[in-house]
Amino acid sequence: MDLIYRYDPHLPISVECPSDSAAAMRLLCDGNLRLTSVVAQMQKATLGEGGVSEIVVPMSPVSLGLPLVAGAVSTQRPYALVLGCSDARVPVEPIFDQSFNDLFVLRIAGNVLGTECLGSFDYAVRQFADSLKLVVVLGHTGCGAVSAAVETYLSPTDYADIAFTHALRSLIDRIMIAVRGAAGAIQQVCGRKVQQHPNYKDALIEVAVYLNAAITAFDLRREIAAFGGGSMHVVYGVYDLATLFVSPIPAAHPTKPGFAPAPQQENLTTLGQQLAQAVVDKGVLGE
Ligand SMILES: [Zn+2]
């Protein structure tokens, strides 16, 4: 199988600049779908199950967000602002098949919202008011920061061992609200006895990952509105390390990427229960 990047200087160059949040989401979803389908083709080839023999990817310096001529410098024009996790398996641009100058990215363990992080958002929303159309909070399955918060929730006596520095404690404390919400939601869906289930911790981590992304998006929308970005559309999604799809709801076999708008406060409890039900439907808490 050949993966060919092709530049033809005689072909017209088109650069997509999304005009609104829906177009920005489409670009990100299309990019994530390109990633998942290319990898699926390679995985098929690995197993000798066929797949395509050649994929040609047209590109030019301009579509890559780079200068067309030597020595020129591009003006910064990101169309989306993304808050993701620092996890090495979750690089934002490759996940959405995006390039230079497309995304303004902040990566913090657990995609939590700290003061310096908000300062960067404040700067970006003011500085790139013309090009920015969307704000995305991107969580991911198997998040180490969320797992550490779940560990401290389940074993409070080990809190000092897990969060042994002030910095780590502040990170874990910010995620704890999502963990508590996830625990309550799972209990409401499955009953109290669920805590005895051998996969309870895995289920709790998974629900907390999605809820943490949703709650961060909820907080971020409020903060952005406070510094004058009230019209900015804020959404969230979670990158699944197993399927490579970005989605706002857990699914064993997703077929298309997607995001959900930052929830309203009154919908957070219902959202927690929907996430818990989706994790149950995936079979995480099966017999
Ligand atoms: Zn993480």
Image (spheres, rainbow, N blue to C red):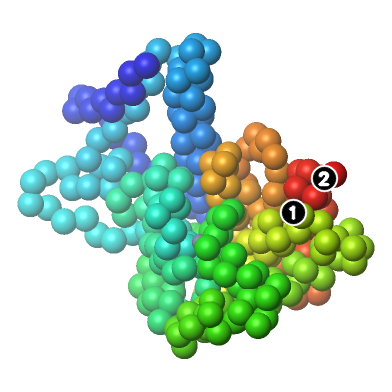
The kind of residue tagged 2 is Gly
Residue identified by numbered label 1: 199
170 relative to 104 in the view: left or right: right
Disc assigned to residue 257 = none
Residue 4 vs residue 129, the one in the foreground? 4
Task: Residue 85 in the image: state x and y as whole percent.
Answer: 47, 62
Graded by Cα atoms within 10 Å as few (under 14), some (14 to 19) or many (20 or more), the crowding at tag 1 reads some
Graded by Cα atoms within 10 Å as few (under 14), some (14 to 19) or many (20 or more), the crowding at tag 2 reads few
Q: Are marks 1 and 2 in contact (CB under 8 Å)?
A: yes
Q: CA distance from mark 1 to mark 2?
A: 8 Å
Residue at the limit of the structure toward the left, as seen here:
71
92 up-or-down from 193: above or below: above
Q: Residue at x 44, y 58 (%)?
A: 87
Q: Quadrant of the C terminus?
A: top right
Task: Residue 17 in the image: state x and y as whole percent.
Answer: 41, 49
Q: Secondary structure at mark 1?
A: loop
